[in-house]
Amino acid sequence: MAIDEHENEPKTSLGRLTRRSFLSHVGAATAATAIAPLASSSASAEAAPTEAASTKIPGTVPITLRVNGQSHAVQVDPRATLLDTLRETLHLTGTKKGCDHGQCGACTVHVNERRINSCLALAVMQQNAEITTIEGIGGPENLHPMQDAFVEHDGFQCGYCTSGQIMSAVAMVKEPWGKTDADVREAMSGNICRCGAYPNIVAAVQAVRRMS
């Protein structure tokens, strides 16, 4: 007795449905189901930037910082340090993050013309201050005399501490320190150079002091 090989295949109102056509329909339905969420996610992603730009970030406070002569309205965590705000929010990465405990001086900036360790200062406390970073001291086309002296006297090796060293040196030249090399070393003792370029740093600072 011959057996109809199509006897157990599903039928539709349009007639017999072969296994091949059935699998084709299932495959198409599966693909459609998979693509729909992706399309929805893509549309949401395109709309997100506009929505985020107009929405306050939970847990932050709005502040205005004046850095290198320009005002910046930003939203920051109340616990954010000035260092992290400069680097992560304003993208001024010349100020380096070293020990993050106020011991190495790599994060030195000027606040109202006085040098501070920006890792120990809260950003929300600096709203009425004039903040200067290494980017505001000078650039490749217009070097500050202290930057020029560091280059001339080879006052750096790896360069990681250099921005903090220069910021500290620029400030100490205006401070009432003595004239000797020992005075410079004492004034710059809060800035650590792991490469040991101290003699050249002192020479660079003294060269600028003689010009003043």
Image: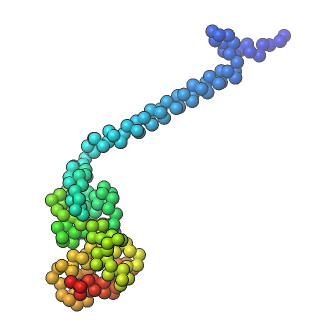
* Above/below status of 183 relative to 74: below
Of all residues, the one furthest to the front in this rendering is 141
Q: Residue shown at 36%/80% (left/top)?
A: 151
Of all residues, the one furthest to the right in this rendering is 1
* Above/below status of 95 relative to 62: below
Where, by quadrant of the figure, is residue 111 drawn? bottom left
- On-image quarter of the N terminus: top right
- Colouring scheme applied when the structure was drawn: rainbow
Total numbered labels placed on residues in the image: 0
* Above/below status of 42 relative to 94: above
Residue 103 percent coordinates (x, y): 28, 73
Where, by quadrant of the figure, is residue 186 drawn? bottom left
Residue 143 percent coordinates (x, y): 31, 74
Of all residues, the one furthest to the bottom in this rendering is 180
Task: Give whichever of 208, 63 is nearer the camera.
Answer: 208
Task: Give whichever of 211, 156 is nearer the camera.
Answer: 211
* Above/below status of 105 relative to 177: above
Q: Residue shown at 32%/62% (left/top)?
A: 92
Please give left or right for residue 124 compared with residue 34 in the image. Answer: left
Task: Give whichever of 12, 149 is nearer the camera.
Answer: 149
Residue 206 percent coordinates (x, y): 26, 86
On the question of residue 6 being in view, the answer is yes
Residue 102 percent coordinates (x, y): 26, 70
- On-image quarter of the C terminus: bottom left
Where, by quadrant of the figure, is residue 101 drawn? bottom left
Q: Residue shown at 24%/63% (left/top)?
A: 68
On the question of residue 196 being in view, the answer is no
Q: Residue shown at 18%/71% (left/top)?
A: 114
